[in-house]
Image (cartoon, grey):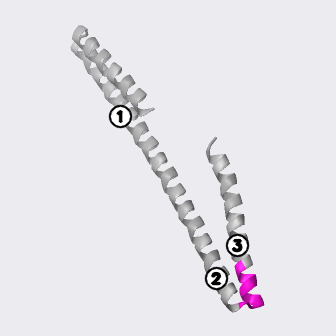
Amino acid sequence: MSIALASVVSVAIIAVAIGCAFASTANATIIVGFATLVIGQAMHYVQEVKSAEIGKQTHALVNSAMGTQLKNYAIAQRTIATMKNTPESIASAEDAEAQVVIYEQRQKVADSHGSR
């Protein structure tokens, strides 16, 4: 999308240059001022698009790390439950594993909403 936007801005600059070549000084000043405004808005739009993409990538990374942490915790709890074999440790392992499943289900729903 930013390539298309850059192309539009380039065409606008060329059109302004041609217009300035055939216009009076007053009209040229207005045309250049308008072109500067358009280019500024285009640059602002490109920056917003980049920021939104960085935000999405950061969110995906954080979600991935959270899933990994939950899985590691579940593995640790299952290991402890296997070693201790007490009702409390088994319940803790089952709870940790259930939290992983819940997180993964919620993440699938969030991902399906984000891909629209």
Judging by the rendered image, the residue that carries numbered circle 2 is: 79
In the rendered image, the residue lying farthest to the right is: 87
Observer-side mark, 2 or 1, equals 2
Above-or-below relation of 5 to 83: above
Above-or-below relation of 24 to 31: above
| Most foreground residue, 75 or 59 | 75
* Quadrant showing the N terminus: top left
Whether 42 is among the magenta residues is no
In the rendered image, the residue lying farthest to the front is: 83
Q: Is residue 53 left or right of residue 37?
A: right
Cα separation, mark 1 vs mark 3, equals 52 Å
In the image, the segment drawn in magenta is 85-93
Q: How many marks?
A: 3
Of labels 1 and 3, earlier in sequence is: 1
Amino acid type for the residue under numbered disc 1: Gly
Across and down, in percent, residue 8 comes to 39, 23
Please name the residue shown 71% across and 65% down the image: 101
Give SS at disc 1.
Answer: helix
Residue 37, by quadrant, is: top left
What's the mark number on residue 56? none
Across and down, in percent, residue 70 comes to 61, 71
| Most foreground residue, 102 or 91 | 91
Q: Main secondary structure of the magenta part?
A: helix
In the rendered image, the residue lying farthest to the top is: 22
Judging by the rendered image, the residue that carries numbered circle 3 is: 97
Judging by the rendered image, the residue that carries numbered circle 1 is: 40
Please name the residue shown 25% across and 16% down the image: 17
Amino acid type for the residue under numbered disc 2: Thr
